[in-house]
């Protein structure tokens, strides 16, 4: 097997501030000076409640335009698998899974989004742990910058055409009427 690291001496072993890196195989070795005996290996799995839930992309305030697509991802910094994710919009359950895809958003998609991560620990999954992400505020504004730029470009071009026609008409009048 792997390397055996002595963790202490005496009949008791106490692990404090246990974490998932304490998972592994533990064995007791006893010696009376003449002979050595080892216990049956004990496989220890440390289960960690979910914590530090985040939504990406941040920041906590997000502004998008009508018709945009928005993808939000939920993750946990720690937590033993399996972890489930539930999305909320304005406090109401919206969807399941680590990724929330919002397609062709409209003003109704505005509001707060939050992700809840859950894992069940214990021999029969009796202990349920939940952790909430900070709320992300999504603001959907009508129109998009592209539409605004195109509209500005079209109106500028129309103004140019009107001025060009005015100059041509003025020039023709001046020449034809004997300016």
Image: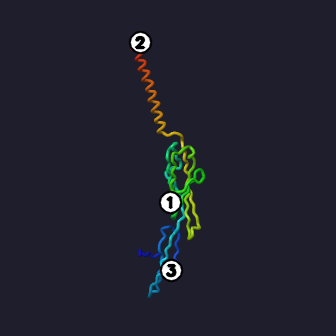
Q: Where is residue 71 in the image (x, y as percent from the top left)?
A: 49, 50
Which circle's residue, 3 or 2, is located before the other in the chain? 3
C-alpha separation, residue under disc 3 versus residue under disc 2: 118 Å
Q: In which quarter of the image is the C terminus?
A: top left
Who's the residue at 50% across and 70% down the image?
45
The residue pinned by badge 1 equals 77
For residue 28, above or below residue 173 = below
C-alpha separation, residue under disc 1 versus residue under disc 3: 36 Å
Which circle's residue, 2 or 1, is located before the other in the chain? 1
C-alpha separation, residue under disc 2 versus residue under disc 1: 83 Å
Label 2 neighbour load within 10 Å: few <14, some 14-19, many 20+? few
Q: Position of residue 18 (x, y in %)?
A: 52, 69
| Mark seen at residue 177 | 2
The residue pinned by badge 3 equals 10
Q: Are marks 2 and 1 in contact (CB under 8 Å)?
A: no
Q: Position of residue 26 (x, y in %)?
A: 48, 75
Q: Nearer the viewer, residue 61 or 105?
A: 105
Secondary element at image label 1: strand
Secondary element at image label 3: loop
Who's the residue at 59% across and 50% down the image?
90
Who's the residue at 53% across and 70% down the image?
16
Question: Seen in the image, is 157 located left or right of residue 131?
Answer: left
Q: Where is residue 23 in the image (x, y as percent from the top left)?
A: 49, 70
**Front of the two marks 3 and 2:** 2
Q: Nearer the viewer, residue 97 or 91?
A: 97
């Amino acid at each position: 097997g792997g390397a055996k690291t002595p963790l202490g001496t005496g009949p008791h072993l106490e692990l404090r501030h246990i974490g998932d890196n304490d998972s592994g195989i533990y064995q007791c070795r006893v010696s009376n000076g003449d002979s050595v005996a080892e216990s049956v290996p004990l496989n220890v799995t440390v289960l960690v409640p979910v914590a530090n839930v985040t939504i990406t992309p941040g920041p906590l305030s997000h502004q998008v335009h009508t018709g945009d697509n928005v993808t939000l991802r939920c993750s946990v910094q720690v937590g033993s698998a399996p972890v489930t994710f539930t999305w909320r919009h304005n406090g109401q359950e919206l969807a399941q899974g680590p990724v929330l895809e919002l397609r062709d958003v409209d003003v109704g998609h505005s509001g707060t989004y939050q992700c809840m991560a859950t894992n069940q620990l214990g021999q029969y999954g009796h202990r349920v742990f939940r952790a909430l992400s900070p709320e992300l505020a999504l603001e959907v504004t009508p129109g998009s910058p592209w539409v605004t730029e195109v509209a500005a470009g079209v109106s500028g071009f129309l103004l140019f055409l009107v001025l060009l026609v005015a100059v041509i008409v003025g020039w023709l009048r001046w020449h034809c009427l004997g300016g």
